[in-house]
Image (cartoon, grey):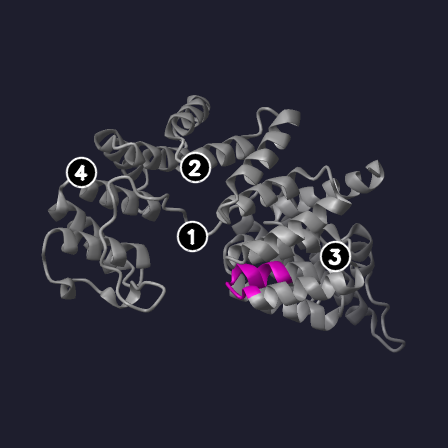
Amino acid sequence: MNQRRLQKHAARGAVLALWLGLPAVSQAAAKSASKPAPPAAKQSVATAAVATTTDADRDRFIQDGDKHTELGRWADAEKSYRDADRARPNDPTVLGKLAATVLRLERAGEAVALFDKALHLKPGYLDFRLGHARALGADGRFADASHEYEAVLATRPNEYLALLGAAQTHGWAGEYKQAADFYERLLVQHADSVEGMLGLASTLAWNDQFDRAMGVYEKVLKSDPKNKEARLGRARVYGWQGNLTRAREAYEELLREAPGDHLLLVDYAKILAWGEEYKRSINIYERVLKDDPRNVEARLGLARVVAWDGDLARAEHLYDEILDEQPENNAAVMGKIQVLHWGGRPLGAAKSSAAHTEDGAPSLEPATPTPPPARGAQPTG
């Protein structure tokens, strides 16, 4: 493996991780963009002084924004980059940094528009194209994001970040076969990419290829036994395979290291519920919700397990609370339908339009006491 190339991608990836996977503008580009424009031939001394001051202000604001970014102070970084944009409007370097920061603040639609503007000023610039694709994916425009990544790959077939982004986007869209294909393509060129291996393992697991997924996780753990994401992925696969004893042991080991981790606690509560340890599961969900009352995954899990434990009235109330805030939450709709069905009550009390089987008929069958795993909205990696 070409170590220099790996180092190059690692350095670039570190910046991406800082900006939600988005590449920073290169130092050369920033230096070029920051050069003050020469004054016009007949420009007055006063006008030239204003222009110089504007450029100096812009550079200072950019430096402030970069410092805030390094410290993860995204709101402060946005303010500094906006000040830079006002000092010298339509500078593509500033727009790219601002777009990345806005995306980090979870305003994906606004980030798409900013990247569009930056690309109009600097067409074809790779970092902007990759950032634009990432923003499209974050905005739920998976087809557009995939098209952008694949357009990059048409001319740069081995571009690491484009391969990774395409794989992740297909995974978010539930297109697991395509996602796995891109991860495997990435690993042909970058065999030592832990990020690529973890993404492939997660995608395989979501596509019910548990044995292959476990093999990839074990490969990561062989070289890095403490890798938390691989250990978490392995614990989940144990659960999805029905090996609840191994799953429980794996989660308990992780929780000894991070006892207050809400993601681990919610997953562990599911494992306990699948093993019919309902009271322990309920206690853990309630512990999470005491710290984080708006945690939807924990609220859904609590309602589900309360119903399995036989308290249908409380389960219905919990589902109603979620539906009051999120009327189209399909998991809550289906959960309430099941509760009403178990209680022998009319299904009209639930908003059943969102819950259907594959052939379009309403899904009325109650869940079994130990159901198949209830996975989240999208895979990780």
Q: Residue at x 78, y 69 (%)?
A: 46
- The earlier-in-sequence mark between 1 and 4 is 4
Q: Amino acid at mark 1?
A: Ala
Residue range of the region highlighted in magenta in the rendering: 133-142
- The earlier-in-sequence mark between 2 and 1 is 2
Q: Is residue 175 magenta?
A: no
Q: Which residue is mark 4?
A: 309
Q: Which residue is mark 3?
A: 56
User: Mark 3 and 2 residues: CB-CB less than 8 Å, in contact?
Assistant: no
How much space separates mark 3 and mark 1, taking CA atoms? 46 Å
- The earlier-in-sequence mark between 3 and 1 is 3
Secondary structure mostly seen in magenta is helix
Mark sitting on residue 241: 2
Query: Based on the displayed image, in which of its 4 quarters is residue 45 positioned?
Result: bottom right
Q: Is residue 83 visible?
A: no
Looking at the rendered image, the disc whose residue lies closer to the viewer, 3 or 1, is 1
Looking at the rendered image, the disc whose residue lies closer to the viewer, 2 or 4, is 2
Query: Based on the displayed image, in which of its 4 quarters is residue 132 positioned?
Result: bottom right
Q: Residue at x 70, y 61 (%)?
A: 128
- Please tell me how crowded label 2 is: few (under 14), some (14-19), or many (20+) other residues with Cα within 10 Å: some
Query: Looking at the image, which is closer to me, 57 or 199?
Result: 199
Q: Amino acid at mark 2?
A: Gln
Secondary structure state at the residue bearing disc 4? loop
How much space separates mark 2 and mark 4, taking CA atoms? 23 Å
Query: Looking at the image, which is closer to me, 61 or 257?
Result: 257
Mark sitting on residue 377: 1
